[in-house]
Each structure stands twice: as structure tokens, then as C-alpha cells.
Image: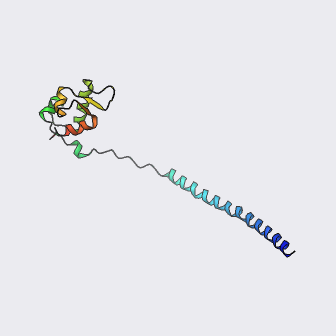
Amino acid sequence: MATAKKKAAKKPAAKKTAAKKPAAKAPAKKAAKAPAKKAAKKAAKKPAAPKKPRKPNAAFMKPMTPSSVLGSVIGMVPMPRTEVTKKIWDYIKKNKLQDAVNKRMINADDKLKQVFGGKGKVSMFEMTKLVSNHLK
């Protein structure tokens, strides 16, 4: 009989702790939600930082003199590397030298073959490397 009394005593104790846990969690949830709402309100109140205009890299904007071979394609006027690349792309599109199947490849004509070191077909990434050899 003593064992029966002990079992009965354990069951109500377990129920009491189970009943206390949800009560303890409920205020914690409310407390967690309140700071989140305050943080959201604070974030909404802050004005957006004004955007600064983007400054170009000085190395790219330095005028470079093209070689005579490259000058026959883009002109002999000194210009930044970015402009040189734009002029070459204008020449490629004007003369339809971009490969129809693989748009990353450029089929060189006689003028561009000299710039590309005799290569007939060059990728657009290799093109910038080869063109930089003709800039001073």
C-alpha cells in the first residue's frame, strides 16, 4: 500500500509544474514582442542616409594614348580606358563582328586582327587584355 500512496503523490506534482510552465512562457512572449515592435518603430523613424554620387576611379579616367594600330580603329585622340572599350564595341557592332552563336566571341576583321596580335577569334574578356597592350 505504501507504493500506491507514493505514486499518487507524484502525479499531482507533475501536473502543477506543467501548469506553471505555460504561465511563465506567456509573459516572456509578450516581453519579446514589445522590444521587437519598438525596434521596428525606431528603424522606421530614421531618415534614409543621402546617397553620395559615385566617383569614378582616377586610373580608369586617365587619358591613354592609343598606338597607331589601335588608332586606326578608334582614332588617335587620347581617351580613358572606358572610352576605348566603348569605341571598340561600337566598331564591333557597326561591322557585325560579334559571333552569332556565341556572343562572347569576336570575329576580327583585318584592322582588329592587328590589334589582337593576329588572332582571328577572341573572347570579349581576352579583348580588353589585348587592347591594353596598345595603350600608353
Q: Is residue 102 left or right of residue 16?
A: left
Q: Residue at x 13, y 35 (%)?
A: 67
Instruction: Where is residue 47? Give x, y as percent.
Output: 46, 50
In the rendered image, is residue 80 in sight?
Answer: no
Q: Residue furthest top?
A: 95
Q: Nearer the viewer, residue 103 or 23?
A: 103
Res 31 visible: yes
Instruction: Specify the quadrant of the image occupied by residue 136.
Output: top left
Q: Residue at x 71, y 61 (%)?
A: 22
The residue nearer to you, when weighing 3 against 65, is 3
Spot the residue most to the right.
Answer: 1
Task: Pick out the residue farthest to the bottom.
Answer: 2
Against 72, residue 45 (above or below) is below
Q: Say which residue appears at 27% left-offset and 26% top-offset.
A: 93
Q: Position of residue 103 (x, y in %)?
A: 32, 30
Report the residue at 64% width, 58% height from top.
29
Residue 125 figure quarter: top left
How many numbered circles are shown? 0
Quarter of the picture containing the N terminus is bottom right
Q: Nearer the viewer, residue 44 or 57?
A: 57
On the image, the x and y values in percent for residue 87 come to 23, 31
Q: Height in image: 62 above or below 90? A: below
Q: Quadrant of residue 2?
A: bottom right
